[in-house]
Image (tube, coloured by chain):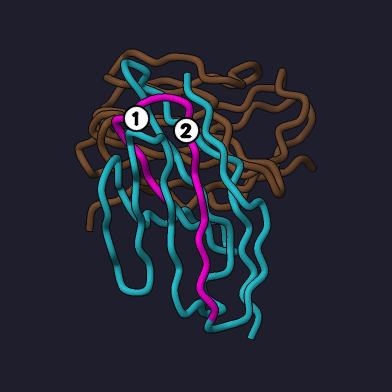
Chain colours: A brown, B cyan
Amino acid sequence: DGGITQSPKYLFRKEGQNVTLSCEQNLNHDAMYWYRQDPGQGLRLIYYSQIVNDFQKGDIAEGYSVSREKKESFPLTVTSAQKNPTAFYLCASTFTSAQPQHFGDGTRLSIL
Amino acid sequence: GIQVEQSPPDLILQEGANSTLRCNFSDSVNNLQWFHQNPWGQLINLFYIPSGTKQNGRLSATTVATERYSLLYISSSQTTDSGVYFCAATSGNFNKFYFGSGTKLNVKP
């Protein structure tokens, strides 16, 4: 079945550590997105990519980095510069912004 | 970008009741989606509906693009309908999806 796979489901970060969240899709979608969700809040856009080797900052990109070396993969690195990383992270993809967006099941990141 | 506003922010229903959730947007849209976020955090696609009306079982949605709003109807609500409902839209040449702040629905048995 086609879909979006995020891993791991739960992740713990130590102070000063960078961690990478994985997002893989086999839907042949061109565009991929990363969102952050804090408890009881809506979704905020971190980064998005329309094509391979290209990506744009969203509304809250500081302290995060991404890469898009392959069409099916869009990993997100939470760097030590992100002082409040505890949140639920959701990855999404779509053919174009005029088409339906599909989501993975998310990764919950906490600080140790 | 565009502004997306949802109402009401919170809704409590008795099982079996009907409800209407509203999503207003500030500009013309080329994508409008409704999602249900379940208690485990999964975002489930309900409708892709930039215009017109669609139905799926007890749920239906209507988007009136010229008046810049969309409605999600839930009939004969069940406890499994509980969760948060989000609408999201894109507009013009913007490639970003703009989300509303959600409606939190609690259906009591």
* Quarter of the picture holding the C terminus of chain A: top right
**Residue B92, position in %: x, y?**
32, 19
B22 or A7, nearer to the observer: B22
- The segment highlighted magenta reads B17-34
**Mark pair 1, 2: CA separation:** 8 Å
Residue A5 vs B13, above or below: the answer is: above
Report if residue B31 lies within the magenta region. yes
Q: Chain of mark 2?
A: B
**Could you say where residue B28 lies in the image, as x and y percent from the top left?**
35, 26
Query: Residue at coordinates 32% horizontally, 15% vertically from top-left?
Result: B93
Query: What residue does disc 2 label?
Result: B25
The answer to whether A38 appears left or right of B21 in the picture is right
Q: Nearer the viewer, residue B26 or B94?
A: B26
**Do dots 1 and 2 share one subunit?**
yes
SS category of the residue bearing label 1 = loop
Structural crowding at the residue carrying mark 1, measured as other residues with C-alpha within 10 Å and reported as few (<14), some (14–19) or many (≥20): many
Residue A76 location in percent, x, y?
A: 50, 29
Amino acid type, callout 2: Phe
Between A65 and B80, the one nearer to me in the picture: B80
**Which residue in the structure is indicated by mark 1?**
B29
Residue A89, quarter of picture: top right
Q: Is residue B22 magenta?
A: yes
Which residue: 42% across, 20% down? A67
